């Protein structure tokens, strides 16, 4: 059964996440000639599989688009219906919906499934909607981050937005543990400042900070300002802030891997 693909993001007033989503759509819209995951070279301290590799040289273009959960003139359900109608006219009778979210919060667990159910009720049986697991479930995300976490830095902080929802920290802690990093949060404790202070007290001088965000935006700008202020407060430290994950062929390959399972 041929499928079209709809990537669902949160939505932002900042234009940069929108541009990044457009880049992902372009990367995914060409059917990969080869998606391979190598399980070799996993001996010693290398605990990470190799990332899937994507060859987008194929000329077979698929129907792929993006939608927003929030900050869109249309509800997500209506965006899904409109895309599904377009897919139907192009010969697709199934739409795979991929939540481009890192963490399993309320949006992933409740809001998106509700909107998909509303859209399915509107569409009836003419198009099948298939809601996929959110992007953060793919173990390859740790591999992407592992490429950023270099040995030149003594220790690392994985900085997530944070939520007061019970259990919200656990997925972040799990990723941080795999990276030999400590977790910190922008909106809740433990804060970035408290983590930097604790690591400085423990004798670390080179501290890397990885924003656990998919794309650059307003919050990552605020994080950069905060890191600059912390650098002035702790002049003996070398604080190294990385970019967020960003749109790339490697990220697109993880999305492909989710929908191909």
Image: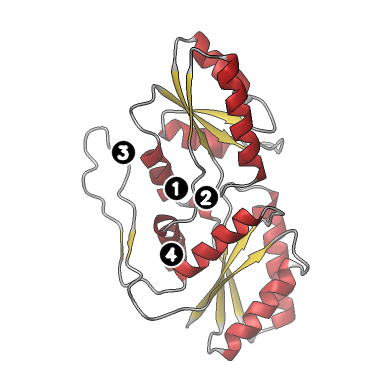
Q: Which residue is mark 4?
A: 256
How many numbered markers are drawn? 4
Q: Which residue is mark 1?
A: 141
- Residue at the image point whose x is 21% and y is 38% from the top: 43
Q: How far is disc 2 from disc 4 in space, using C-alphas? A: 13 Å
Kindly check if marks 1 and 3 are in contact, taking CB atoms under 8 A apart as contact: no
Q: Secondary structure at mark 3?
A: loop
Counting from the top left corner in percent of width and height, residue 33 is at: 31, 72
Q: Residues within 10 Å of mark 3 (few under 14, many from 20)?
A: few
| Of 43 and 240, the residue lying toward us | 240
Kindly check if marks 1 and 2 are in contact, taking CB atoms under 8 A apart as contact: yes
Report whether residue 99 is seen.
Answer: no
Kindly check if marks 2 and 3 are in contact, taking CB atoms under 8 A apart as contact: no
Q: How far is disc 2 from disc 3 in space, using C-alphas? A: 19 Å
| Of 46 and 120, the residue lying toward us | 46
Counting from the top left corner in percent of width and height, residue 10 is at: 66, 55
Q: Which residue is mark 3?
A: 47
Counting from the top left corner in percent of width and height, residue 233 is at: 60, 15
Q: Which residue is mark 2?
A: 136
Q: Counting residues from the N terminus, which is met first, the one under dot 2 or under dot 3?
A: 3
């Amino acid at each position: 059964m041929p499928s079209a693909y709809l990537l669902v993001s949160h939505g932002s007033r900042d234009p940069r996440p929108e541009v990044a989503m457009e880049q992902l759509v372009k990367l995914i819209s060409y059917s990969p000639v080869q998606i391979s995951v190598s399980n070799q070279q996993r001996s010693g301290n290398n605990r990470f599989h190799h990332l899937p590799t994507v060859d987008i040289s194929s000329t077979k273009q698929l129907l792929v688009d993006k939608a927003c959960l929030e900050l869109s003139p249309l509800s997500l359900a209506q965006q899904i219906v409109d895309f599904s109608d377009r897919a139907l006219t192009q010969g697709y009778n199934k739409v795979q919906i991929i939540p481009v979210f890192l963490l399993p919060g309320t949006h992933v667990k409740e809001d998106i499934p509700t909107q998909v159910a509303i859209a399915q009720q509107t569409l009836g049986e003419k198009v099948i909607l298939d809601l996929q697991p959110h992007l953060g479930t793919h173990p390859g995300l740790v591999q992407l981050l592992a490429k950023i976490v270099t040995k030149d830095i003594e220790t690392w902080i994985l900085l997530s937005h944070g939520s007061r929802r019970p259990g919200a920290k656990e997925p972040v802690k799990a990723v941080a543990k795999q990276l030999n990093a400590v977790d910190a949060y922008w909106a809740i404790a433990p804060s970035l400042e408290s983590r930097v202070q604790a690591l400085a007290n423990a004798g670390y001088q080179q501290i890397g900070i990885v924003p656990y965000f998919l794309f650059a935006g307003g919050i990552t700008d605020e994080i950069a300002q905060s890191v600059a202020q912390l650098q002035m407060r702790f002049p003996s430290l070398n604080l190294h802030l990385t970019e967020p994950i960003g749109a790339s062929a490697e990220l697109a390959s993880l999305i492909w891997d989710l929908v191909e399972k």
